[in-house]
Image: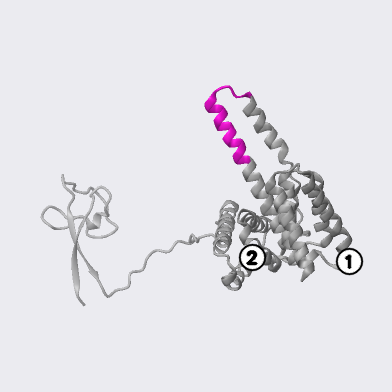
Amino acid sequence: MQQYAADVTLDPDTAHPDLILSDDGKQPSGLSGPRHSGQVHCGKEPRKIFTSVSLTEDVQLNKAKQVWKPSGKRSSCADEGKSELLKTQELFKCVWSVLFKLVWSVFQPLMKQMTELTINTEERLKGVVHLIYEKAISEPDSSEACANMCRCLMGLKVPTTEKPGVTVNFRKLLLKHCKKEFEKDKDDEMFEKQKELDAATGEEEKQRLKEDLEDAKDKACRRSLGNIKLTGELFKVKMLTEPIMHDCIVKLLKKRDEESLECLCCLLSTIWKHLDHEKAKPRMDQYLNQMKKIIKERKTSSRIRFMLQGVLDLRQANLSV
């Protein structure tokens, strides 16, 4: 068996007496046995000993009676909450990635990706609905594809946060978005901005507030048009009923402001073929007569009158087919 010598430096004040060598390399007299005790010769420098360690022998370590083991319950509620939050954020990133690439040519594979996502809480479902809705109304050209995606997700439902025994579904949350935007009173917001503009004194401040007011009006108009376009597309995929469409048309006709009339033209252009059937013909004729009256009164801008006339021409063309 091979033996290897190792230099070990010991502190004479703490080392076992049997391990201490005298200055001449011999063990001090009277300390030949492990049970002897007495004065230990201490020099200025710690002395060295040589001991042999076998590389082939198993070294037995002392084992404590009570061994510490990592607990399986170390994850706190805060850690779990953080993990769930990260999962939710990752879900929204995946949804946005799908929506960013949403075009008809790749609709099926993108829809497959959406159905494979884990949408199992109220917070996540609301977030997904919000992302799809905002995509549709901010980019009206994508509203048809978004509506078809909504149709595929329509039956998705999850337990509510406050009452786990009660569920909330995708369709209900989406229609809530559409209704809220349709019924939003934008006049109050514009009135407040107009008041700020009227109260301004400096020219620079007036110019800034004027630009803010115009931007707010443009944004509100775009959202209204995007919302009504999506509403029409949802009707086409049978997520909204015909009575809801008639209700929207009547409300838009009653308002008579230019934004409402533009939304009316957008809605009718989207759903006309699906709404203009024999049973609904009397109601459709009433709408057309009111539109003709608005054109004749010439109280609206020429742009709106041309849009109204375009809808009338579209209906006439459909009747001629």
203 or 118, which is in the foreground? 203
Mark 2 is on which residue type?
Answer: Ala
- Mark carried by residue 145: 2
Judging by the rendered image, the residue that carries numbered circle 1 is 279
Looking at the image, the residue that sits furthest to the left is 24
Is residue 181 toward the left or the right of residue 97 in the image? right
Is residue 48 toward the left or the right of residue 321 in the image? left
Looking at the image, the residue that sits furthest to the top is 201
Question: Few, some or many C-alpha atoms within 10 Å of disc 2 (few <14, some 14-19, many ≥20)?
Answer: some
What is the secondary structure assignment of the residue under circle 1?
Answer: helix
What is the secondary structure assignment of the residue under circle 2?
Answer: helix
The type of colouring in the image is one colour
Question: Few, some or many C-alpha atoms within 10 Å of disc 1 (few <14, some 14-19, many ≥20)?
Answer: few
Q: Position of residue 278 (x, y in %)?
A: 87, 68
Q: Which residues are magenta?
A: 199-216
Hey, which quadrant is residue 214 in on the image?
top right
Relative to 35, is 194 above or below?
A: above
Hey, which quadrant is residue 157 in on the image?
bottom right
Q: Position of residue 156 (x, y in %)?
A: 71, 65
27 or 115, which is in the foreground? 115
Q: Residue at x 58, y 56 (%)?
A: 80
156 or 229, which is in the foreground? 229
Q: Magenta: predominant secondary structure element?
A: helix
Q: Position of residue 16 (x, y in %)?
A: 27, 55
Q: Is residue 215 magenta?
A: yes
Q: Residue at x 72, y 65 (%)?
A: 154
Q: Position of residue 96 (x, y in %)?
A: 57, 59
Q: Looking at the figure, which quarter contains the C terminus?
A: bottom right
Relative to 277, is 76 above or below?
A: above
88 or 39, which is in the foreground? 88
